[in-house]
């Protein structure tokens, strides 16, 4: 029943990526390992006090006594005693409300290593951007005891014991937001950009499904509205990407150049706007840096919205060089192209 629950889609479950699962070994268990001459290694690196596994992905409910799982792609845990070994791969942490389990693969077969008491120890933070579990008491399962003693040839007082306490398990994982194809990104073009384009004899038109509006008093050079087209964000840090459809076409005489698939790219050390220029086979060209403004979120366990407000788009040197090479139009890097506001639905 436990396996069936975790293999089925979870109602109102969120996706997760990044984070860690950590097993803190108790002093008593460490003394037992030393007495039995058993050594541990995580990903082939010796471990004496804690076992730490990086979370690669997962799905779980954002509630107290959460239900779901966390995968640790590429992970391994090795027990060794002299030349004897038992190695678990593809470590997986599962939650079923009041219980938890740490499992892995041994010779292509699943093995439940630890059983955990999880009641009241798991839940989401206040902004529903992260799921944590703290100090879940963990013990060896009977199948794990049999497998370890058989593989390591342990007997008597050096053998692992049924339901032997190991320590505690804690985890922390950031929610991964899927950006839905709803909402818009709207740019109010700056006079500095539009006027310099016109001075160069370059005309800018809109590519559907983008839409041009204006001019208006607060946008004297008009607006460009592009529909949001997916992406992924870390719910806690709001790092990631948000894409859009449509774009603009620049033309001068017979020469035309499309700039499409604008993408907001949020990294820890930089925020950029990129786009594709298919006429010259460029993808992901850095168009502009994103300066100032705010990015905010409003989340609940099932989804929510992420919003940009008042972000200034400043011409990137690569885009400036491309514009100069293609049209002989020299707009200095750092020139504000406009100010963007956007809102996207996420889940």
Image (cartoon, rainbow, N blue to C red):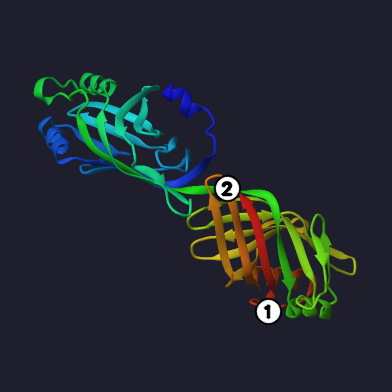
Measured as percent of width and height from the top left, residue 347 is found at: 58, 46
Measured as percent of width and height from the top left, residue 200 is found at: 82, 78
Residue 275 image-quadrant placement: bottom right
Measured as percent of width and height from the top left, residue 138 is found at: 26, 34
Number of the label disc, if any, that sits on residue 66? none
Q: Residue at x 15, y 23 (%)?
A: 159
Label 2 Cα crowd, 10 Å radius (few <14 / some 14-19 / many 20+): some
Camera-side mark, 2 or 1: 2
| Rendered position, 250 above or below 157 | below
Dot 1: what SS? loop
Label 1 Cα crowd, 10 Å radius (few <14 / some 14-19 / many 20+): some
Q: Mark 1 highlights which residue?
A: 332
Residue 278 visible in the snapshot: yes
Q: Closer to the camera, 329 or 268?
A: 268
CB atoms of marks 2 and 1 within 8 Å: no
Of the numbered discs 2 and 1, the one sitting upstream in the chain is 2
Q: Residue at x 29, y 30 (%)?
A: 114
Measured as percent of width and height from the top left, residue 94 is found at: 40, 33
Asked whether, in this view, residue 60 is left or right of residue 261, the answer is left
| Rendered position, 132 above or below 40 | below
Number of the label disc, if any, that sits on residue 303? 2
Q: Residue at x 16, y 38 (%)?
A: 30
């Amino acid at each position: 029943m436990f396996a069936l629950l975790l293999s089925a889609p979870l109602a109102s479950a969120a996706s997760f990526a990044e984070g860690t699962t950590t097993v803190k070994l108790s002093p008593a268990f460490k003394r037992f390992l030393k007495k039995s001459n058993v050594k541990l290694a995580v990903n082939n690196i010796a471990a004496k006090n804690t076992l730490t596994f990086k979370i690669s992905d997962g799905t779980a409910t954002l509630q107290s006594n959460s239900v779901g799982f966390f995968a640790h792609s590429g992970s391994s845990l090795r027990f060794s005693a002299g030349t004897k070994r038992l190695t678990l791969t593809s470590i997986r942490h599962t939650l079923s409300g009041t219980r938890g389990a740490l499992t892995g693969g041994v010779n292509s077969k699943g093995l439940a290593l630890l059983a955990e008491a999880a009641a009241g120890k798991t839940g989401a933070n206040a902004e529903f951007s992260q799921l944590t579990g703290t100090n879940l008491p963990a013990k060896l399962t009977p199948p794990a005891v049999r497998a370890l003693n058989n593989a390591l040839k342990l007997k008597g007082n050096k053998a692992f014991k049924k339901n032997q306490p190991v320590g505690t398990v804690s985890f922390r994982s950031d929610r991964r937001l899927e950006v839905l194809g709803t909402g818009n990104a709207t740019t109010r073009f700056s006079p500095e950009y539009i006027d310099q384009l016109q001075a160069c004899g370059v005309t800018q038109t809109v590519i559907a499904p983008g839409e041009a509006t204006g001019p208006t008093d607060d946008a004297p050079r008009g607006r460009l509205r592009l529909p949001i087209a997916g992406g992924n964000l870390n719910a806690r840090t709001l790092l990631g990407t948000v894409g859009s459809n449509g774009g603009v076409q620049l033309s001068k005489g017979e020469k035309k150049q499309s700039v499409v698939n604008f993408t907001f790219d949020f990294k820890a050390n930089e925020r950029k706007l990129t786009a594709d220029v298919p006429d010259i086979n460029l993808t992901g060209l850095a168009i502009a840096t994103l300066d100032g403004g705010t990015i905010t979120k409003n989340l609940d366990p099932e989804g929510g919205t992420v919003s940009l407000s008042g972000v200034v788009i400043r011409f990137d040197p690569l885009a400036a060089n491309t514009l100069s090479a293609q049209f002989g139009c020299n707009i200095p890097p750092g020139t504000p192209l406009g100010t963007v506001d956007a809102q996207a639905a996420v889940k």
